[in-house]
Image (cartoon, helix red, strand yellow):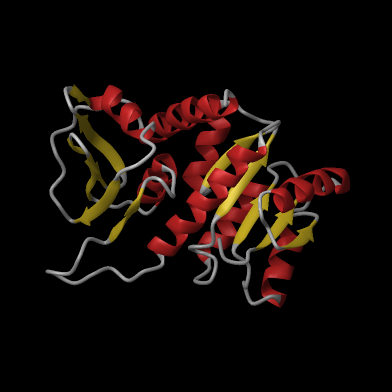
Amino acid sequence: MQRLKVLLVDDSGLSRKVQAKVLREVGVDEIVEAKNGLDALRQLQELDYQVGLVVTDWNMPGMDGLALIDELRKSAKGRHLPVIVISSEGEDDRIAQAFARGASSYVTKPFKKEILARKIQAVRLIADLGAKETPKAGDPPLMEGDLERLGFAELVGFLNFSKKTGELLVDLETGQAGVSLRDGEVQDAWIGRFASEEAFHAIARLQRGRFRFHEGRPPRAQRIKQSTVSLLMESMRLLDESTQGT
């Protein structure tokens, strides 16, 4: 991983100290600290947004983590800046709010450093992919990469927030898996003999496979009834549980 500067936002000095220690353990080179969202925006302006990642708490006085994300996503320089929300609040509706506002990923305290390291790598790679220009007709897929290096759930989260329509395909040794989206909402998923929700969670557990997203492909008929945010939360929870057990 190339050198990484992180903006760490938390109103508790003790929490910042603990989280900074974990960030250094997972390979972060430089940490800039802020005590709330307003302080974070001020420091981003001073740094001309030259940070690779924002890690923010949810509950803070002055400006909380969600309001900070709102301001970042309004800005041209902050739109693709990866943001991980770290919070002791793990309820589904709160996680759903974070994703709906544009969070790149969500980590519930307490967490293992291996989980944070995986999510940092995933959201940075997805931010790089999202910053690329949309190809013209006949060009390669809008996004492509390897699931071994980034998270499927974070990838679908980006497509959901960006309201993309198209087809996300994953090449496997035994064939192909895929997810169809309309305006960011998952319509269908398939892998082997599985389809719909069961297939989505199976794809989310894949450790390797080349993926590519073809923007503009007509979406398939809707077979998935769960909301995309609900699918993402369940998939991320299952993956984090499997990581906790290693």
For residue 11, above or below residue 90: below
Outermost residue toward the front in this view? 173
Instruction: Give percent across and percent down for residue 199.
Output: 27, 27
Instruction: Give percent across and percent down for residue 66.
Output: 61, 48
Q: How many marks?
A: 0
- Is residue 58 among the parts visible in the rendering? yes
Residue occupying image coordinates x 73% and y 41%: 59
For residue 114, above or below residue 69: above
> Depth check: 69 or 124 in front?
124
- 113 relative position to 156: left or right: right
For residue 172, above or below residue 240: below
Instruction: Give percent across and percent down for residue 226.
Output: 33, 26
* The quadrant where residue 42 appears: bottom right
Outermost residue toward the right in this view? 14
Residue occupying image coordinates x 45% and y 26%: 234
* The quadrant where residue 223 appears: top left
> Depth check: 131 or 22 in front?
22
- Is residue 61 among the parts visible in the rendering? no
Q: Quadrant of the C terminus?
A: top right
Q: Quadrant of the N terminus?
A: bottom right
- 164 relative position to 14: left or right: left
Instruction: Give percent across and percent down for residue 224.
Output: 25, 27
> Depth check: 16 or 225 in front?
16
- 61 relative position to 91: left or right: right
Residue occupying image coordinates x 59% and y 60%: 71
Residue occupying image coordinates x 42% and y 40%: 153
> Depth check: 110 or 243 in front?
243
